[in-house]
Image (spheres, rainbow, N blue to C red):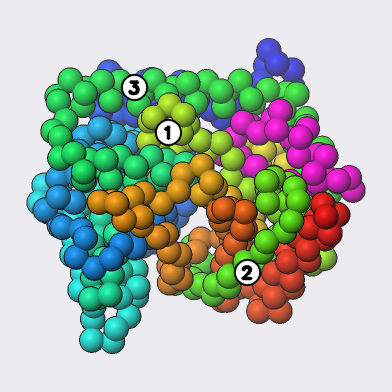
Amino acid sequence: MNARTHRSITGTYLKFYRGANDGVAELMPLTGAQRRFHHTRSADPRGRVRILPVFLEFPPGLLTAHRLERATRAVLLRHPALRGVADTAGGLPVLRIGPVPAGPLVQEIFAPETGDLDGAVWAALEDWPTTAGSLRVLLARDGRRDLLVLGLDHLVCDGESTGLVLDELMSAYRSGAAVPDAEVTAGLHRYREVVEQRLAVEHAASGPEALAHWTSRVRDAGPGRWGRDRDPGGPGGQVSAWHRLSAPGSAPDRPFPVLLAAGHRALAGLPGTAPVAYTWGGQDDTGVVGCFINTVLANPGGGSVQESWWEDLEFADTPFDEVVRAARASHAPWTGHLDLVLTLIDRTRRPAPVLDGVPGRFRYPPGHRIEDPMIVTAVHDRGELSLRIDHDPTIVPGADATGVAGTLREAFADAGRVAG
């Protein structure tokens, strides 16, 4: 198919969106990632939300619910995406921007008799009513700590944006300043502008050259090993393991290529696995909260992952659904399933905020349901790399998860020896 006759998924979506929107300012188009999340939620009989959590610990008594309530309202007013809910218009998936939800915005939680404060927090995040909006804010206490917890609907917020939300929440907590109506209106226009820019990039990255590149990448990819036939309404599960690594030399400064190569090596040792995938992108530099990421594959086809990664970056904006469509059109064994997804959290760029002279401490407690069979989260902070490996034990055997963890550890040890 040549450039003249090709019609991208993004272009087709925008064509129908313009017909369904009818000039309604509160209806926003969805990026490629948002449409994927919308589809996944629609296929889940429970309609469950994919939550991006942030846990920040402070000394006991430092936070007050009243000031946190006021700060949360300010953040919601400034960022329309956080007031958005997934909806349809004319059968088309959209984001509908509403007012700040009525009623209390912050839920206080006190330590249960069991002492499992983390468990109580996860339960509250999962049970959050849909009418309360896409930003969940909890203030949990157990006498030893104040735990500030944010739970963000991934459909309206990506990982880069969570840092912006937290920064602005802390700033509003300190200042207590009101948000002028003009700023609220400007924020709505700015969000639409950034979303439309992102969609234009996705459309431009969906041409024949990009699709030929990704078709060549997935031609020999396996169909997927874990959970290809899983019930989308199943309860799922999570088993977590932390591995703290401190590789000398270049590895801590540029951890992602090493991590990507290690993930590929780990899956290559297991028959039938799908390509390793990773989240990429975001619009953190725009100051606009939203979901602007893409899911990108790494499958070098016999070459070096670290070398092929640089080639792939030229086409990293090709929407994941376009790559899936190209793979299916080429009759490749892989048709869109993901076994392992990598995410990097760079705390060297955005450390924990300081409140009243006291620095907070990020925490990463287990307990939430994961949507992919295995998720590897790398936290890069002050020269140390911590790997959190989550897997769903209902579909991923423990031996497979242990093997992946071992390969990741060995890869960083090898990188450290080479660098040293």
Judge the density around disc 2: few (<14), some (14-19), many (≥20) Cα neighbours within 10 Å: some
- Which region shows up in magenta? 294-321
x and y, in percent, of residue 135 in the image: 29, 49
Relative to residue 286, is residue 336 drawn left or right?
Answer: right
Gap in Å between the C-alphas at discs 2 and 3?
A: 40 Å
Q: In the displayed image of the protein, which residue is found farthest to the right? A: 302
Secondary structure type for disc 1 = loop
Q: Earlier in the sequence, mark 2 or mark 1?
A: 1
Which corner quadrant holds the C terminus? bottom right
Q: Is residue 3 above or below residue 140?
A: above
Task: Judge whether residue 311 is colored magenta.
Answer: yes
Q: Who is closer to the viewer here, 303 or 364?
A: 364
Residue most extreme to the front:
357
Q: Amino acid at mark 1?
A: Leu
Is residue 124 visible from the viewing direction of this image? no
Q: Position of residue 306 (x, y in %)?
A: 80, 44
- Taking the image as drawn, is residue 52 in sight? yes
Q: CA distance from mark 3 to mark 1?
A: 15 Å
235 in the magenta segment: no
Residue at horizontal 57%, vertical 65%?
388
Q: CA distance from mark 2 to mark 1?
A: 36 Å
Mark in front: 3 vs 1: 3
The disc placed on residue 243 is 2
Does 297 sit left or right of 15 as displayed? right
**Mark 2 against mark 3, which lies toward the viewer?**
2
**Residue bearing the label numbered 1:** 30
Q: Kindly identify which residue carries mark 3.
A: 190
Q: Is residue 16 above or below residue 222?
A: above
